[in-house]
Amino acid sequence: MDKNKQTIFFHQRTRDRTGMFPLAQKLPILDLLRRFYLPLTLIYYLAYLSLKRLGTGDRALLRASLIALAIESLVYFICYKRPLGSLGPSYLWDYEEGRRLLFSLILSWGGTLALVYYGVRRWGFISQATAGSLLGLLILAGNVFLCLLSYELLSYVFFGVLTYLVSVASFSLANYFIGIWIWAFLISFVCAVLFAFFTNRAFVFQDKGNLWQDLGKFVLARIGSSIFFEVLLMWLMIEVLHWDEDLSRSLGAFCVTVANYFLSKFVVFRKKENKRKR
C-alpha cells in the first residue's frame, strides 16, 4: 500500500464495499482550480481559437471545439502521469481520485456530445459557434461542481447521467422503429430501471442485501416516480403542449433522475444503512 503515497491526495488504506480506496481528506477546491482547472480551461480556449482560424462555417467550429476538448483531456491525463505511471490503469478504478478523474472525463465528453446533438443539431436552440465558446466554461463549472460532491453523490450523478442517456437513447431508437411513443417509453423504462438498479446497488449505495427484494422495492419506487414525473409530464408536453417527443422524454428523464436519488437513498436502501450504523 506504499503506492498510495504516490497519488496526489492521500487515500485510506482499506477498501470500501466497491473495492475502492477512498480519499482520506476532502478535495482542496481552490488548489485544484489554481493548479488544474483554470489552466486546463485556458488551454482549451487557446486551442479552440487557434483551430477556429483554420476554417469557417458550423462544421469547422464544431471540429475545433471537439479537438480542443481532446487536447484538454490529454493534458488532464498528463497532469496525473505520476499516479498513473506508478499504479497503472488500476488507479482509475481502485482509487477514489482516479474514479473522480474518469467520471469527470466521461461526463465532459458525454455532455459535449449531448449538447452538440440535441442542443445544436436536433433542437437548434444554440448555434455551434456559441456551443464551442460555452464548452470551456461548462466543463470548468462541471468539474468544480463534481469536486464539491461527496463520492456517493458523485457516483449517483455519474450513473444517473448514464441512466438518463440509456433512457433517452433507448426511447429514441424504439420510437424510431415502432412510432408509438407510449410503447417506446415502456421499453426505455425497462432498460433504464435495470441499468440504474445494478449500478446503484453495486457502486452508489453499496448494498449487498437480497437481490430480488431490492429489485422489487427499486422497481416499485421507480414506477411511482415515473408515473408522476414521466408519464403524466410527457403526456402534458406531447399531447397537450405538442412539444418534441425526444425533448419531452429528456425533461421527464431529468426530473425522475433527481426524484429517484431521494427514493433510493431514504426508501429503498434506508433500513440497510441504519443497520450498518448500529
Image (cartoon, helix red, strand yellow):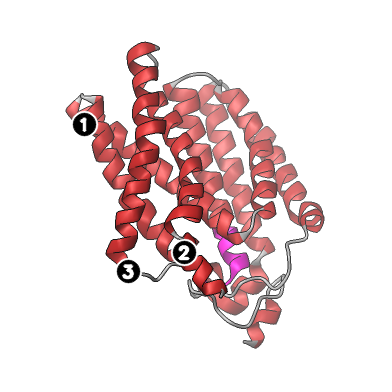
Q: Residue at x 25, y 26 (%)?
A: 181
Secondary structure, magenta segment, majority class: helix
Residue at left offset 64%, top offset 44%: 142
How far across and how far down the image is residue 53, in percent? 65, 29
Mark 2 or mark 3: whose residue is earlier in sequence: 3
The label number, if any, that marks residue 67 in the structure image? none
- What type is the residue that disc 3 sits on? Asn
Q: Is residue 173 visible?
A: no
Point out the tag, 1 or 3, that comes first from the N-terminus. Answer: 1
Residue at image coords 56%, 75%: 278
**Quarter where residue 240 is shown:** top left
Query: As rendered, which of 80 and 277 lies closer to the eye?
Result: 277
Q: Which residue is mark 1?
A: 183
**Where 174 sits versus 12, above or below?**
above
**Disc 3 marks which residue?**
210
Q: Which residue is mark 2?
A: 271
Residue at the extreme top: 241
Residue at position x 69%, y 62% from top?
A: 79
Q: Mark 1 or mark 3: which is in front?
A: 3
> What is the distance, in whole Å, between disc 2 and disc 1 at their CAs?
35 Å
Q: Is residue 100 magenta?
A: yes
SS under mark 3: loop
- Image x and y of residue 57, in percent: 54, 20
* 223 or 187, nearer to the observer: 223
Which x, y percent locates residue 220?
Answer: 32, 48
Q: Using the numbered discs, state the Cα–Cα distance from disc 1 to disc 3 in whole angstroms.
A: 31 Å
